[in-house]
Amino acid sequence: MPSPIHPDVERLRNRLNTLVLLVPGQFVPLVAAYWLRFVPAFRPFAFEVPAPPPWLLLTCAGVMLLPALLPRGYFRPRRFERGSFYPALGLRVFRAVATDGDWINRRLRRLDPGYRVVRDRRTRAEHIAGSITNERWHTSWLLLGLVTTASALATGQHGWAIAITIFNVVFNLYPVCHQRYKRARLRAIPDVIAATSSARAVT
Protein backbone atom coordinates (compact mmCIF):
# COMPACT_ATOMS: atom_id res chain seq x y z
CA MET A 1 0.00 0.00 0.00
CA PRO A 2 1.48 3.41 -0.97
CA SER A 3 2.65 5.61 1.90
CA PRO A 4 0.76 8.87 2.54
CA ILE A 5 2.18 12.19 1.43
CA HIS A 6 4.60 13.67 3.96
CA PRO A 7 3.19 16.81 5.66
CA ASP A 8 6.16 18.93 4.50
CA VAL A 9 5.56 17.84 0.91
CA GLU A 10 1.84 18.60 1.17
CA ARG A 11 2.53 22.09 2.57
CA LEU A 12 4.99 22.86 -0.21
CA ARG A 13 2.52 21.52 -2.76
CA ASN A 14 -0.18 23.89 -1.50
CA ARG A 15 2.20 26.86 -1.53
CA LEU A 16 3.42 26.19 -5.05
CA ASN A 17 -0.10 25.67 -6.36
CA THR A 18 -1.07 29.04 -4.85
CA LEU A 19 2.01 30.66 -6.40
CA VAL A 20 1.23 29.55 -9.96
CA LEU A 21 -2.32 30.89 -9.60
CA LEU A 22 -1.29 34.41 -8.58
CA VAL A 23 -1.09 35.92 -12.08
CA PRO A 24 -3.91 34.08 -13.93
CA GLY A 25 -6.06 34.36 -10.81
CA GLN A 26 -6.31 38.10 -11.43
CA PHE A 27 -9.13 37.21 -13.83
CA VAL A 28 -11.63 37.33 -10.97
CA PRO A 29 -10.76 40.83 -9.63
CA LEU A 30 -10.46 42.09 -13.22
CA VAL A 31 -13.99 40.97 -14.09
CA ALA A 32 -15.26 42.27 -10.74
CA ALA A 33 -13.68 45.67 -11.42
CA TYR A 34 -15.35 45.78 -14.84
CA TRP A 35 -18.87 45.18 -13.50
CA LEU A 36 -18.49 47.25 -10.33
CA ARG A 37 -18.15 50.39 -12.47
CA PHE A 38 -21.84 50.03 -13.33
CA VAL A 39 -22.84 50.17 -9.66
CA PRO A 40 -23.78 53.80 -8.79
CA ALA A 41 -21.65 53.84 -5.65
CA PHE A 42 -18.52 52.81 -7.60
CA ARG A 43 -19.21 54.51 -10.95
CA PRO A 44 -16.28 56.71 -12.08
CA PHE A 45 -17.19 60.35 -12.72
CA ALA A 46 -16.22 60.19 -16.41
CA PHE A 47 -17.85 56.79 -17.03
CA GLU A 48 -20.91 57.29 -19.24
CA VAL A 49 -21.69 53.73 -20.39
CA PRO A 50 -25.25 52.84 -19.29
CA ALA A 51 -25.72 49.95 -16.89
CA PRO A 52 -27.04 46.69 -18.40
CA PRO A 53 -30.70 45.90 -17.72
CA PRO A 54 -31.44 43.56 -14.79
CA TRP A 55 -32.90 40.86 -17.06
CA LEU A 56 -29.57 40.62 -18.90
CA LEU A 57 -27.67 40.18 -15.63
CA LEU A 58 -30.10 37.45 -14.52
CA THR A 59 -29.68 35.70 -17.87
CA CYS A 60 -25.91 35.79 -17.47
CA ALA A 61 -26.20 34.33 -13.97
CA GLY A 62 -28.36 31.53 -15.36
CA VAL A 63 -25.82 30.77 -18.09
CA MET A 64 -23.10 30.43 -15.47
CA LEU A 65 -25.13 27.72 -13.73
CA LEU A 66 -25.33 25.53 -16.84
CA PRO A 67 -22.01 23.66 -16.25
CA ALA A 68 -23.41 22.34 -12.95
CA LEU A 69 -26.18 20.63 -14.93
CA LEU A 70 -23.95 18.89 -17.47
CA PRO A 71 -24.40 15.08 -17.43
CA ARG A 72 -21.53 12.78 -16.45
CA GLY A 73 -21.24 11.54 -20.00
CA TYR A 74 -20.10 15.00 -21.10
CA PHE A 75 -16.88 14.53 -19.13
CA ARG A 76 -15.99 11.24 -20.80
CA PRO A 77 -12.86 11.71 -22.98
CA ARG A 78 -13.68 11.42 -26.67
CA ARG A 79 -11.50 9.49 -29.08
CA PHE A 80 -9.93 12.61 -30.62
CA GLU A 81 -8.99 13.81 -27.12
CA ARG A 82 -6.78 10.75 -26.61
CA GLY A 83 -4.56 11.61 -29.57
CA SER A 84 -2.50 14.65 -30.50
CA PHE A 85 -5.34 17.19 -30.24
CA TYR A 86 -4.42 18.68 -26.86
CA PRO A 87 -0.63 18.55 -27.36
CA ALA A 88 -1.18 20.47 -30.60
CA LEU A 89 -2.92 23.19 -28.56
CA GLY A 90 0.11 23.51 -26.31
CA LEU A 91 -1.30 21.61 -23.34
CA ARG A 92 2.05 20.00 -22.59
CA VAL A 93 3.58 23.44 -22.17
CA PHE A 94 0.61 24.59 -20.07
CA ARG A 95 0.85 21.45 -17.93
CA ALA A 96 4.41 22.38 -17.04
CA VAL A 97 3.26 25.49 -15.18
CA ALA A 98 -0.25 24.44 -14.08
CA THR A 99 -1.32 23.47 -10.57
CA ASP A 100 0.08 20.03 -9.74
CA GLY A 101 1.97 20.37 -13.00
CA ASP A 102 5.39 19.19 -14.09
CA TRP A 103 7.34 22.05 -12.47
CA ILE A 104 5.63 21.56 -9.10
CA ASN A 105 6.03 17.78 -9.23
CA ARG A 106 9.76 18.10 -9.91
CA ARG A 107 10.15 20.40 -6.91
CA LEU A 108 8.21 18.03 -4.66
CA ARG A 109 10.24 15.02 -5.76
CA ARG A 110 13.35 16.70 -4.45
CA LEU A 111 11.84 16.24 -0.98
CA ASP A 112 10.21 12.90 -1.68
CA PRO A 113 11.56 11.00 -4.73
CA GLY A 114 8.52 8.72 -4.63
CA TYR A 115 5.95 11.50 -4.72
CA ARG A 116 3.09 11.01 -7.20
CA VAL A 117 -0.31 12.69 -7.43
CA VAL A 118 -1.82 9.42 -8.67
CA ARG A 119 -0.40 6.67 -6.47
CA ASP A 120 -3.06 3.94 -6.57
CA ARG A 121 -6.61 3.23 -7.72
CA ARG A 122 -8.13 5.38 -4.96
CA THR A 123 -6.04 8.47 -5.71
CA ARG A 124 -6.66 7.92 -9.44
CA ALA A 125 -10.42 7.94 -8.84
CA GLU A 126 -10.13 11.06 -6.66
CA HIS A 127 -7.99 12.76 -9.29
CA ILE A 128 -10.56 12.07 -12.00
CA ALA A 129 -13.41 13.29 -9.80
CA GLY A 130 -11.43 16.42 -8.95
CA SER A 131 -10.78 17.13 -12.61
CA ILE A 132 -14.53 16.97 -13.32
CA THR A 133 -15.33 19.36 -10.48
CA ASN A 134 -12.61 21.75 -11.63
CA GLU A 135 -13.86 21.62 -15.20
CA ARG A 136 -17.36 22.58 -14.09
CA TRP A 137 -16.02 25.59 -12.15
CA HIS A 138 -13.69 26.79 -14.89
CA THR A 139 -16.43 26.42 -17.49
CA SER A 140 -18.66 28.68 -15.40
CA TRP A 141 -15.91 31.28 -15.11
CA LEU A 142 -15.20 30.89 -18.84
CA LEU A 143 -18.82 31.74 -19.65
CA LEU A 144 -18.67 34.75 -17.32
CA GLY A 145 -15.55 35.92 -19.13
CA LEU A 146 -17.20 35.53 -22.52
CA VAL A 147 -20.26 37.51 -21.41
CA THR A 148 -18.03 40.23 -19.96
CA THR A 149 -15.97 40.44 -23.15
CA ALA A 150 -19.14 40.66 -25.23
CA SER A 151 -20.38 43.51 -23.01
CA ALA A 152 -17.07 45.35 -23.34
CA LEU A 153 -17.09 45.01 -27.13
CA ALA A 154 -20.72 46.09 -27.42
CA THR A 155 -19.97 49.26 -25.46
CA GLY A 156 -16.70 50.09 -27.22
CA GLN A 157 -14.43 49.24 -24.29
CA HIS A 158 -11.86 47.41 -26.38
CA GLY A 159 -9.03 47.58 -23.86
CA TRP A 160 -11.16 45.81 -21.28
CA ALA A 161 -12.24 43.24 -23.88
CA ILE A 162 -8.63 42.39 -24.77
CA ALA A 163 -7.46 42.16 -21.15
CA ILE A 164 -10.40 40.00 -20.03
CA THR A 165 -10.01 37.69 -23.04
CA ILE A 166 -6.32 37.11 -22.31
CA PHE A 167 -6.96 36.28 -18.66
CA ASN A 168 -10.00 34.18 -19.57
CA VAL A 169 -7.92 32.01 -21.89
CA VAL A 170 -5.17 31.51 -19.31
CA PHE A 171 -7.36 31.11 -16.21
CA ASN A 172 -10.31 29.23 -17.72
CA LEU A 173 -10.06 27.97 -21.30
CA TYR A 174 -6.72 26.25 -20.92
CA PRO A 175 -7.59 24.82 -17.48
CA VAL A 176 -10.80 23.33 -18.96
CA CYS A 177 -8.73 21.70 -21.70
CA HIS A 178 -6.19 20.62 -19.10
CA GLN A 179 -8.79 18.76 -17.04
CA ARG A 180 -10.01 16.90 -20.13
CA TYR A 181 -6.43 16.18 -21.17
CA LYS A 182 -5.69 14.66 -17.76
CA ARG A 183 -8.68 12.34 -17.97
CA ALA A 184 -7.76 11.35 -21.52
CA ARG A 185 -4.23 10.50 -20.36
CA LEU A 186 -5.63 8.47 -17.47
CA ARG A 187 -7.97 6.63 -19.87
CA ALA A 188 -11.02 7.48 -17.73
CA ILE A 189 -13.78 5.07 -18.70
CA PRO A 190 -17.51 5.82 -18.13
CA ASP A 191 -17.98 3.59 -15.10
CA VAL A 192 -14.98 5.15 -13.36
CA ILE A 193 -16.40 8.64 -13.96
CA ALA A 194 -19.83 7.56 -12.72
CA ALA A 195 -18.39 5.97 -9.60
CA THR A 196 -16.28 9.00 -8.71
CA SER A 197 -18.40 11.94 -9.83
CA SER A 198 -19.31 12.85 -6.25
CA ALA A 199 -15.87 12.27 -4.73
CA ARG A 200 -14.03 15.16 -3.15
CA ALA A 201 -11.95 17.38 -5.48
CA VAL A 202 -8.24 17.22 -4.75
CA THR A 203 -6.74 19.43 -7.47
Image (cartoon, helix red, strand yellow):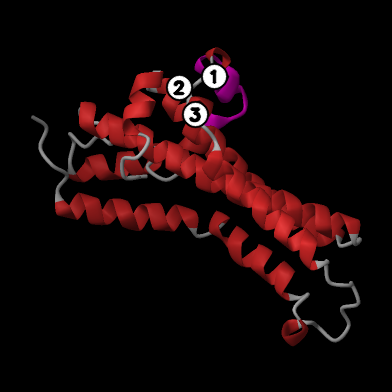
Can residue 92 be seen at all in this image of the molecule?
Answer: no
Query: Residue at 42% across / 21% down in the picture?
Result: 185
User: What type is the residue that disc 1 sits on?
Assistant: Glu
Residue denoted by label 2 = 184
Which picture quadrant has residue 114? top left
- Residue 133, horizontal then vertical, whole percent: 44, 42
Query: Residue at 47% across / 30% down in the picture?
Result: 72
Marks 3/1: CA–CA distance: 11 Å
Looking at the image, is mark 1 or mark 2 earlier in the sequence? Answer: 1
| Of residues 100 and 203, the one drawn nearer to the viewer in this rendering | 203
- In the displayed structure, does residue 71 sit left or right of residue 54? left
Query: Residue at 83% across / 59% down in the picture?
Result: 152
Single out the mark in the foreground, 2 or 3: 3
**Disc 1 to disc 2: CB gap under 8 Å:** yes
Q: Which mark is residue 135?
A: none
User: What type is the residue that disc 3 sits on?
Assistant: Phe
User: What type is the residue that disc 2 sits on?
Assistant: Ala
Residue denoted by label 3 = 75
